[in-house]
Image (cartoon, rainbow, N blue to C red):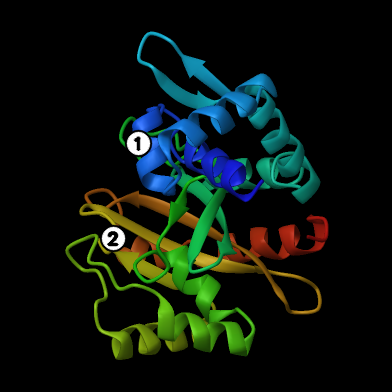
């Protein structure tokens, strides 16, 4: 069962498809066993086999389950209208993420109206140390979780301004906790800036992070920080309306 779940996760992380040999190598499962297990997932509709490219892709049943989970968490019915309103006001992309281990998981995204903008795929993971949402999720996590993350997150240099010094990350996270928002200035990707705020439950516990992201040529960091009150108002509304996780 554990190996089948691992294969399913790997397929889910490759929406454009993954070959049997790649599955076996990434999972550490022998090719013959991987073939048997992934075919059983195909029979359940969780995985689909693309005969032309001989690649395994997420199946419709997996999509259906993901949609049901999204509805249960309120990411579609509750969050989407609020995020759409934010995008209409900012004219930039609005994103939502939740903490998932030592990474954050994109759970919702609203595209901006501009021809050039920021794109995201719900279901994808992102790093914590070089994204505005990641920093917020660390800053407002429970104290023991925050301390553990600050010790363990990998400081991979994704963008030109990625934080690669753990003390600098601690300072940035402390600053985010103090002022109630975090920024990322070409830290995850060159030419991309973002600002994020926490979505907190009425009891003050962390639920998710809400972000506005834009190309650096169009928005300065000051422009994005000026959007913080708008994001905070939306986050306050979502913190009350989103169902318990």
List x then y, in percent, for residue 147.
51, 89
Residue 160 or residue 145, whichever sits in front: 145
Quadrant position of residue 174: bottom left
Q: Residue at x 38, y 59 (%)?
A: 194
Answer with the quarter of the image where residue 47 lies: top right
Instruction: From the image, tell me which residue sits under label 2.
Output: 220
Please indicate, yes or no, whether residue 176 appears anywhere in the rendered image: no
Q: Residues within 10 Å of mark 2 (few under 14, many from 20)?
A: some
Crowding at mark 1 (Cα within 10 Å: few <14, some 14-19, many 20+): few
Element at badge 1? Answer: helix
Left or right: 150 with respect to 161? right
Q: Earlier in the sequence, mark 2 or mark 1?
A: 1
Secondary-structure class at tag 2: loop
Task: Measuring from the top left, give residue 25's x and y in whole percent.
Answer: 35, 43
Q: Quadrant of the C terminus?
A: bottom right
Please tell me whether residue 223 is drawn above or below residue 179 in the rendered image.
Answer: above
Residue 5 appearing in the image: yes
Which residue has dot 1 on it? 22
Residue at horizontal 35 percent and vertical 14 percent from the top:
53
Q: Which mark is residue 7?
A: none
Q: Is residue 172 above or below residue 32?
A: below
For discs 2 and 1, the disc positioned in front in the rendered view: 1
How many marks the image carries: the answer is 2
- Tell me: 71 left or right of 66: right
Q: Position of residue 193 (x, y in %)?
A: 32, 58
């Amino acid at each position: 069962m554990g190996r089948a779940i691992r294969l399913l996760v790997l397929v889910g992380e490759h929406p454009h498809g993954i070959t049997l040999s790649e599955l076996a190598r990434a999972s550490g499962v022998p090719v013959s066993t991987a073939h048997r297990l992934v075919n059983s997932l195909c029979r359940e509709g969780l995985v689909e086999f693309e005969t032309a490219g001989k690649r395994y892709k997420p199946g419709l049943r997996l999509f259906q389950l993901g949609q049901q989970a999204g509805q249960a968490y309120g990411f579609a019915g509750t969050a989407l209208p609020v995020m759409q309103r934010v995008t209409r006001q900012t004219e930039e992309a609005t994103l939502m993420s939740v903490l998932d281990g030592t990474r954050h998981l994109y759970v919702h995204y609203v595209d901006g109206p501009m021809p050039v903008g920021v794109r995201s795929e719900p279901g994808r993971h992102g790093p914590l140390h070089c994204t505005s949402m990641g920093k917020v999720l660390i800053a407002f996590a429970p104290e023991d979780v925050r301390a553990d993350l600050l010790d363990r997150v990998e400081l991979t240099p994704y963008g030109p301004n990625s934080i690669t010094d753990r003390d600098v990350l601690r300072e940035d996270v402390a600053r985010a906790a103090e002022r109630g928002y975090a920024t990322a200035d070409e830290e995850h990707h060159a030419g991309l800036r973002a600002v994020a705020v926490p979505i907190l439950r009425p009891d003050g516990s962390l639920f998710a992070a809400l972000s506005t992201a834009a190309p650096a040529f169009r928005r300065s960091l000051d422009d994005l920080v000026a959007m913080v009150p708008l994001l905070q108002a939306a986050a306050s509304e979502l913190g009350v309306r989103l169902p318990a996780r």
